[in-house]
């Protein structure tokens, strides 16, 4: 009976599954957070008002060119290929053996960063011009405006898209098995290789992936609701949210 | 009289469209100046040029004897001396009422949080919004938002308050509450520069009324002169058109 096999496989191998799921979550979470940070940073740089002349203008232009190249390269090539190129390439070029997990974190982070910087750009564009003007009018410069006024609103607005990235990352870390990172897919492969029950072994993995993605979805939704707060204000009501 | 801001030969073009042409104009300390004129006459652009939200194409803006259009002048510091109130309120959506009034003080003026909150509450009381400190902008009506926006600008304790059509985006029943707040500010002796369509307000509180038309100052003088005895044909026409509507 298949159901019995499913249970037996899970009971026999749960430490491996759990470790795999742990690594998957770790890579996905770190990748998403670092990627979001990269995205926010690039978003701020790419919205710097253009200086009219001088060396600043040239530097900004060069930086922007570099950022565009970065985004286009990492959006335009598959992560599985990037993993191979970066992992084996670094060994070939610098004669160093990078730790597989470090390589994995690096690849997922910069990949997410490329996507996130476009998401952040969209988020910044969508903020009303009046918010920028009001910030400037009280004397804020670009960095202060971004940090205090714009980015907090952008982060709220791009939360759904960031959640998307997180979920994609949970699933896509599975491609890192090509450089033998011991994430959930890799672990499942070795479990199945031992018992030759491919369907059952991977079905268990399937359920674990689903549990992870659904949990993340649910957590992000509650964060959004918490950030939004109520739509109306009651005078004298207990709304401590300073 | 001490001039706070003086504009000399100011011009502004958007592409080939010349919005302001050779404007000479000054605001004296303690004075309330209302700028009136039809849409597209350049009055809002003039106000936005004064605090450099628009970069003037030519001319000078003199503040405390210095031309702030000089490359080396610190425009960020200059802007803290001007309080700006927008037509669309532009409250910071990520902050509550108190946060809106505090952030500029702590981040720009480097006041302590306690001091900033004290100042903020003081001005929120002036505009009658001190009960709403924890409310978010989306929870407020238009009139309430505008009153908070006024308190936000006042909290920076600027030398001049600039109002860019502060009541134009409000429902008619909310115009009154904002104008009432503005009148208390006038009584407190604040220097104010108000772009407005509210002729009654201009007539009642202005020390001087400036009528703008097609990018030039067509006529300026005390309200009695502008409203009762306008000197130019265009001013007469404009007033006839607007006062008929009221």
Image (spheres, coloured by chain):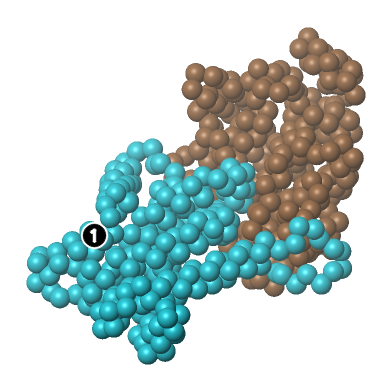
Vertical comparison of B182 with B8: above or below: below
Vertical comparison of B87 with B133: above or below: above
Vertical comparison of A5 with A34: above or below: below
Residue at 38 percent across and 76 percent down: it is A200
Percent x, y of residue B132? 81, 62
Q: How many marks?
A: 1
Percent x, y of residue A168? 42, 62
The chain identifier of the residue carrying mark 1 reads A
Q: Viewer-proximal residue, B125 or A11?
A: A11
Q: Quadrant of residue B62 in the image? A: top right
Does dot 1 land on a helix, a strand or a loop? Answer: helix
Mark 1 closeness class: few <14, some 14–19, many ≥20 residues within 10 Å: some
Q: The cyan chain is which one?
A: A
Residue B83: in sight, yes or no? yes
Vertical comparison of B101 with A57: above or below: below
Residue at 66 percent across and 54 percent down: it is B93
Q: In this view, does A82 lie to the left or right of B39?
A: left
Percent x, y of residue A162? 48, 60
The residue identified by callout 1 is A82
> What color is chain B drawn in?
brown
Image quarter of the N terminus of chain B: top right
Percent x, y of residue B189? 81, 47
Residue A34: in sight, yes or no? no
Residue at 37 percent across and 60 percent down: it is A112
Q: In this view, does B73 lie to the left or right of A115?
A: right
């Amino acid at each position: 009976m298949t159901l019995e096999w499913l249970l037996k496989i899970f009971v026999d191998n749960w430490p491996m599954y759990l470790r795999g799921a742990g690594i998957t979550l770790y890579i996905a979470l770190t990748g998403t957070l670092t990627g979001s940070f990269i995205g926010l940073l690039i978003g701020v740089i790419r919205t710097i008002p253009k200086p009219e002349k001088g060396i600043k203008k040239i530097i900004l232009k060069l930086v922007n060119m570099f950022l565009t190249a970065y985004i286009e390269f990492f959006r335009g090539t598959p992560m599985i290929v990037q993993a191979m190129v970066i992992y084996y390439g670094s060994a070939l070029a610098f004669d160093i053996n990078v730790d597989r997990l470090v390589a994995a974190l690096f690849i997922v982070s910069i990949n997410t960063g490329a996507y996130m910087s476009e998401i952040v750009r969209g988020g910044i564009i969508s903020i009303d011009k009046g918010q920028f003007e009001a910030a400037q009018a009280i004397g804020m410069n670009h960095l202060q405006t971004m940090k205090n006024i714009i980015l907090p609103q952008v982060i709220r607005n791009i939360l759904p898209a960031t959640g998307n990235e997180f979920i994609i990352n949970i699933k896509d870390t599975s491609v890192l098995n090509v450089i033998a990172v011991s994430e959930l897919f890799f672990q499942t492969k070795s479990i199945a290789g031992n018992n030759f029950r491919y369907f059952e072994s991977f079905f268990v993995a399937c359920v674990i992936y689903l549990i992870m993605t659904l949990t993340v979805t649910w957590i992000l939704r509650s964060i959004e609701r918490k950030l939004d707060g109520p739509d109306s204000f009651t005078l004298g009501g207990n709304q401590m949210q300073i | 009289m001490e001039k706070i801001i003086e504009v000399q030969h100011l011009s502004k073009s958007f592409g080939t469209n010349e919005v302001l042409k050779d404007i000479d104009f000054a605001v004296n300390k303690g004075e309330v100046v209302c700028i009136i004129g039809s849409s597209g006459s350049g009055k809002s652009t003039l106000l936005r040029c004064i605090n450099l939200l628009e970069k003037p194409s030519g001319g000078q803006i003199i503040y405390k004897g210095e031309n702030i259009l000089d490359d080396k002048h610190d425009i960020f510091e200059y802007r803290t001396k001007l309080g700006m109130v927008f037509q669309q309120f532009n409250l910071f959506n990520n902050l509550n009422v108190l946060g809106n009034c505090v952030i500029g003080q702590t981040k720009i003026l480097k006041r302590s949080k306690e001091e900033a909150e004290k100042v903020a509450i003081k001005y929120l009381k002036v505009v009658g919004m001190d009960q709403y400190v924890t409310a978010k902008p989306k929870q407020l009506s238009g009139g309430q938002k505008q009153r908070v926006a006024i308190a936000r600008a006042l909290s920076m304790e600027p030398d001049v308050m600039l109002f860019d059509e502060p009541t134009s985006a409000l429902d008619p029943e909310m115009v009154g509450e904002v104008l009432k707040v503005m009148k208390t500010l006038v009584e407190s002796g604040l220097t104010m520069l108000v772009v407005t369509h509210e002729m009654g307000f201009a007539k009642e509180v202005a020390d001087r009324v400036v009528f703008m038309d097609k990018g030039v100052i067509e006529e300026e003088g005390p309200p009695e002169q502008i409203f009762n005895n306008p000197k130019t044909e265009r001013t007469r026409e404009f007033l006839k058109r607007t006062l008929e509507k009221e």
